[in-house]
Image (tube, rainbow, N blue to C red):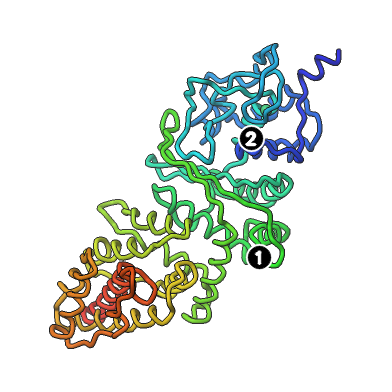
Amino acid sequence: MSRTTTSETTVEISLDHPTGNFWVDMGLVVLSNHFGEGNIDLCEALEHLIGRLKTERGGWIYPANQFINTQARPETLPNKLRSRQEVCDICGMETRCIDAKMWMYPFVVDPQKFGTFYPSAKRGLKLCARCALAGLAGYLGWLYKAQGRDAIHLFVFYSPDLRQLLELYRNVILPFQLNQEGGTAPVAFFGPYLHEATLGLLLELFSHVEKSELLSEEGQALLARILGEDPSTPPAPLFLYVITGKPGQAFNMQQFQEFTRLHALYQLYKRWKGILTHRVEIQDPHPALVQVFRQFQVRRERQYETFWRDRIAWAILEFRDPFPFVEAFLFEGRAREKGAQPLAFGTLEIFELYAKEVLTMDEKLLKTLAGFGHNLGQKVQESGEIGILYDLRNTKKLDEFLKVLEKIPFRLGLTIPEDLTAIESGEKIMGSSWQRVKTLLSIYAMNAYLWANRGRSE
Ligand SMILES: [Zn+2]
């Protein structure tokens, strides 16, 4: 074999040179896990991957079959490389390239620019043999969760430190893939929407640091290190890419999201578990925490409407304000149910911690709102003046809010805490926007109302 032929049929796998593309880099990790680093034979590698991606009946395995056409013939890759030198769009190497097909790259997307999928690209994507091969291997590196025919979520973890990513793949992702029925990702809960499913996956992942039937002790220790269990040693960057779409003949991509703050979320998760253990005195805090987030759904005929849960999950994952969605859930979802129940045990504590630490709300203000909201909800239940809660919830302007507050002493005989009517510049109350104060008061009051109502009906 001449030297030119050799260079045509081998590709170099190195973990020291990430391409920066999450899909191709995950593919490189999958390849190096099997073949090790160094030069590998292209045909042999293709044969191996095709073997793992095909079913006994000759089709492509699910959910790769959503992307790889039945007509695709990856084994012809070596013959399809053009003879002239071109620049690979993924790694930037000048070498022989091929026009990317979907089997090589399921979503041609720049993670910075959400929504720019072009699997049917007009311009076309040029890939070198190595990136095309890694693109095929990428189908072995993801986790997925399907919600019937409504949605499928694809999860790809990523770190530009490919040695760390290899460890994660070997010790966490592979066991997750292998141990679940049909290869689906373990999730604490899921639904048709991207953010709820992502929060469901992350809560489940986090729980495996402490207790796991899927991971080895080494796997657990690795996960702890990667998530930053020890805050004194900064962990390598860790990202999660989530793609949600409708399954069918071919995948219909609807949403693509990059999550970058997994370490901060893990710290929050630990703080939440601590609060549930010490303040709420729950023995086993993980299931209780899961229940806090799972509860934001309402039964509609045969299905659950989980829209609110998705919005709350979005807020948590992005470190934004979840309270308008909690309020909307209570008033538009929960309160309209037959025998409506208050929020799950521990919910208010979980969200108070979030309000304090993430939204930097004043602790004294939170206490005032909790106390007054509680009394308000109870009085409303006793007096049957439920309209006041809806008036409060529906206020759109500060003066409307103050007018609703003014009615309370006359109609319910409750004194308004002075703090709540001391308006600061910028329409703020003790450093928080009046809207947030109003929203939290609605939540506390409606929740107390539901508690009191439950007591009465029982
Ligand atoms: Zn390349």
Q: Quick one: 283 or 443, which is closer to the camera?
A: 443
The reply to whether callout 2 and callout 1 are in contact (CB within 8 Å) is no
Indicate the amino acid at tag 2: Val
Find out if the beta carbon at label 2 lies less than 8 Å from the nearest ligand 1 atom: yes
The quarter holding residue 292 reads: bottom left
Residue 274 shows in the view? yes
Helix, strand or loop status at disc 1? loop
Q: Residue furthest right?
A: 2
Give how far apart the Cα atoms at labels 2 and 1 are. 28 Å
Dot 1: within a 10 Å radius of its alpha carbon, few (fewer than 14), some, or many (20 or more) residues? some
Q: Judge from the rendering whether residue 10 lies leftward or rightward of residue 186; answer left or right.
A: right
Instruction: Give coordinates of residue 404: x percent, y percent.
Output: 18, 75
Q: Tally the numbered discs.
A: 2
Is residue 443 shown above or below 190? below
For label 2, the residue is 24
Name the mark on residue 229: 1
Dot 2: within a 10 Å radius of its alpha carbon, few (fewer than 14), some, or many (20 or more) residues? many
Q: Residue furthest front?
A: 425
Residue depicted at x 53% and y 56%:
202
